[in-house]
Each structure stands twice: as C-alpha cells, then as structure tokens.
C-alpha cells in the first residue's frame, strides 16, 4: 500500500514550512487548503484539537508542529537522505539545531517582538537566557557552517532556514551577514522555490 500524505494548510501560515519539506522529499502528497475559520470547525478539530496549520496526516498518523513534521518526514523517507541515519553521531548536531530553533529561538524572538523586558535576574528562568544570547549563538554557528551539518544539506536546514527567512522578513532578527547568507542559500533551492510558488498560487483559494 503506497504512502498517503495529506497536508492541511493555509498559504498564509506556517504550513509553508511543511510544504518546503514535502517538496524537498519529492513524494506525492495531497493538499487540503482551509481558510481561517474553517480550522475551528469540528471536522478539523477532530484531526488537530489546536486547530493549527500545518497538520500532516500520513496514512493514519497525525503529526503537528513543523519541527515534528519535518523530523518525522525525514525519518519516514530515509532513502531521500535528508536526515543522518540512525546510529550516526551527526544526529546529535541535527537534532540540537532543529530544537534550538523550535525552542529558544522561537521563544526568545517572540518575547523580544512582544516587548517583554528581560531583566538580568530572569535569564536563568526563561530557558533561553536572553534574546541577545540566542542571536549571538545562532550567528556564531552559521558564521562557521554552510549548513547545519557542515557542507551537507539536511531537513534541519529546511526548518532553520525557514525560521531565519521569516524573522529577517519581519525584522525580528538583525540583518547579520551570517543570517542573510544562510537564508539566501536555502531560498535558492529548487524545491524551496517550487514550494513558494505553489503556496503563492493558492492565495485566496480553499478546499
């Protein structure tokens, strides 16, 4: 029985990140485009009670949250070589930066965007120290690595590259050379260009 993949998304949502991963895989999948509001209807809440985009259904398995979707898909299709194989020491680096992005980066930059004042005594309680700590750590890493795994593109770059591109566009990250270079590198990939074209073409359409 062939794999059945369904992506529930809206082209003006973080579902664009999941589509990037699906296009990198190059496997067949179905898209269900929902307008905002439709994601709060019982039919969709039965699949994802949070009513969030993206939601991926792989056969009978429901996966939510972009970091989970991307890492799940990379392991579900190992022949695509988008994740280090089980047993590889590279998996440590791979997981480290995916979840650094989904945890400290997301939290720190959101708090900064919302104007949360980070007092020195709060740094130990926040889990990410401070937005400045997070930005400096990310800048240092990308200044010394072409991709997350050195010179090898992986699913980690789909996620991290998407986040950095988003935060640069919305001026939530400084326009540092390392960030701009990395975002441009990821955005030049044919699958990423193709994914963007698909979502742009879906603007205003629903299933």
Image (cartoon, rainbow, N blue to C red):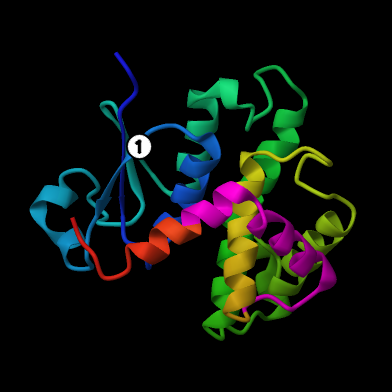
Picture quadrant where residue 33 is located: bottom left
Vertical side of 17 occupied by 119: above or below:
below
Residue most toward the top? 1
Q: Residues within 10 Å of mark 1 (few under 14, many from 20)?
A: some
- Picture coordinates of residue 179, whole percent (x, y): 76, 66
Q: In the drawing, does residue 104 fall left or right of residue 179?
A: left
Residue most toward the right? 144
Which quadrant of the rendered structure holds the C terminus? bottom left
Foreground pick, 78 / 121: 78
Q: Residue at x 81, y 57 (%)?
A: 142
Foreground pick, 105 / 78: 78
User: Does any portion of residue 56 appear in the rendered image?
Assistant: yes
Chief secondary structure of the magenta portion: helix
Vertical side of 78 occupied by 156: above or below:
below
Residue with the mark numbered 1 = 29
- Picture coordinates of residue 8, whole percent (x, y): 29, 49
Q: Secondary structure at mark 1?
A: loop
Q: Is residue 175 magenta?
A: yes
Which quadrant of the rendered structure holds the N terminus? top left
Q: Residue at x 56, y 75 (%)?
A: 111
Q: Residue at x 17, y 51 (%)?
A: 45
Please give the range of residues in magenta.
Answer: 172-195
Vertical side of 29 occupied by 110: above or below:
below
């Amino acid at each position: 029985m062939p794999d059945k993949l369904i992506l529930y998304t809206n082209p003006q949502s973080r579902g664009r990140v999941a589509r990037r991963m699906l296009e990198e895989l190059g496997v067949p999948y179905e898209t269900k485009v929902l307008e905002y509001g439709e994601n709060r209807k019982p039919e969709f809440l039965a699949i994802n009670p949070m009513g969030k985009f993206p939601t991926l259904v792989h056969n009978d398995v429901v996966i939510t949250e972009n970091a989970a979707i991307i890492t799940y898909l990379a392991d579900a299709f190992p022949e695509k070589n988008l994740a280090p194989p089980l047993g590889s020491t590279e998996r440590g680096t791979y997981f480290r930066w995916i979840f650094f992005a989904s945890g400290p980066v997301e939290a720190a930059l959101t708090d900064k965007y919302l104007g949360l004042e980070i007092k020195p005594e709060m740094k130990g309680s926040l889990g990410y120290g401070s937005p400045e700590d997070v930005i400096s750590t990310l800048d240092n890493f990308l200044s010394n690595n072409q991709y997350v795994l050195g010179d090898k593109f992986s699913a980690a770059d789909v996620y991290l590259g998407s986040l950095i591109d988003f935060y640069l566009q919305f001026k939530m990250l400084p326009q540092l050379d390392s960030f701009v270079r990395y975002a441009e590198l990821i955005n030049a990939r044919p699958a990423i260009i193709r994914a963007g074209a698909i979502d742009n073409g879906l603007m205003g359409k629903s299933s």
